[in-house]
Image: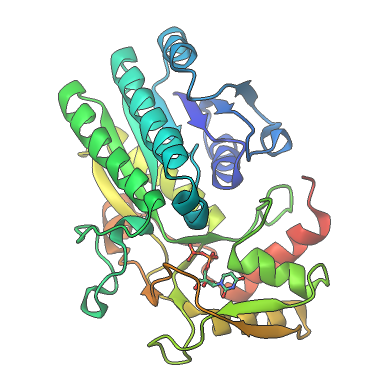
Amino acid sequence: MKILVTGGAGYIGCHFVQHLLSATEHEVLVLDNLSTGHAAACEWTQLIRMDLADFAAVKSLLKSENFDAVIHFAASSLVAESVALPFFYYYNNTSNTLNLIQSCADAGVGYFIFSSTAAVYGEPEPSRIPITEDGPFNPINPYGRSKLASEWALRDISAASGMKFGILRYFNVCGADRHSHLGESHNPETHLIPLLAKTLLGQRPSFSIFGQDYTTPDGTCIRDYVDVEDLARAHLDVLNYLRAGHNSDTFNCGYGHGYSVQEVIDAMQEAGGKPFPVVSAPRRVGDPPILVADVSKLKQLTGWQPKNDDLIDICRSVLNWEQCSRY
Ligand code: UDP
């Protein structure tokens, strides 16, 4: 197959490209505007520096290259930023995705894999956890809404064109390539596990827990942390599932069990072999108390089997990456 990976220079996209190159013979091209991605993260394949907002260029690329599949990672994904810049989120995530989907359908692309998010579920009722793919859908911020709107467009355009789709709704993605060639590098960094690693390594004075009065056993929020290498493999498993003749579908991506912020702090301290300063801070707006996926659909239909479901090992991979990151 000839595969286009948008956002292939970003955190999740580059791990997927690495997996694709090591596990298959497919030809892979990366499209990225390098606004948050890193050229060094995809130096093993051809990088086309292009912005998805350049509709004419995107259309022409798809027409000329005859891709069999497009894996669409490129997006903005910070909740707080989406609240401050809603137009940008609808433009960069929804409008650019809408154009990409239609251009793919027009060009006869067979398969479209879309990066969606648990944010489409909003704050689920406790009785709905673990969360299944059928909703309800109540996104509570522009980021979640921009992704849900893209899902709708993808379903409708695929139905009209015959293009098959796989939607992957990510829970909390974490970890780094075990050879330390690839990892997470955001500026500013806002995610829990890289912040803990930076604190342990002395790059930050302390770590702030956002809220210790949630309705959870230790009072801190619970999330389903899924390793980026396992998530990368899920994309190929879904693509292969569609290529085997199965119908388009939507899949939660997590491990199906959660850890509290306090438990992740403990895991990082164990992985690094030393404590670090932790302070209390107020709740962060828009943080639901518990988000845990039901992943039985992904496992049963595609045969996906996680290999890295070990929080301490995940923390170790992030510590290694933080100490020898190349970008
Ligand atoms: N969190 C925290 N302090 C931080 C960053 C994150 O307590 O400095 C908490 C956050 O409130 C949430 C969890 O860690 O409960 C995971 O947050 P992250 O931003 O990594 O992912 P999100 O769940 O927002 O997608």
Which residue is at 51% across, 82% downward?
A: 211
Q: By what rule are the colours in the image chosen?
A: rainbow
Q: Is residue 52 above or below residue 230?
A: above
Q: Position of residue 263 (x, y in %)?
A: 56, 83
Q: Residue furthest bottom?
A: 217
The reply, left or right, for residue 23 in relation to residue 201 is left
Q: Quick one: 58 or 311, which is closer to the camera?
A: 58
Q: Quick one: 129 or 142, which is closer to the camera?
A: 142
**If the image is split into quadrants, where does the N terminus sit?**
top left
Q: Position of residue 246 (x, y in %)?
A: 22, 39
**If the image is split into quadrants, where does the C terminus sit?**
top right
The reply, left or right, for residue 163 in relation to residue 37 is left
Q: Residue furthest left?
A: 160
Residue 244 appears anywhere in the view: no
The reply, left or right, for residue 48 in relation to residue 246 is right
Q: Is residue 298 above or below residue 278?
A: above
Q: Position of residue 68 (x, y in %)?
A: 39, 22
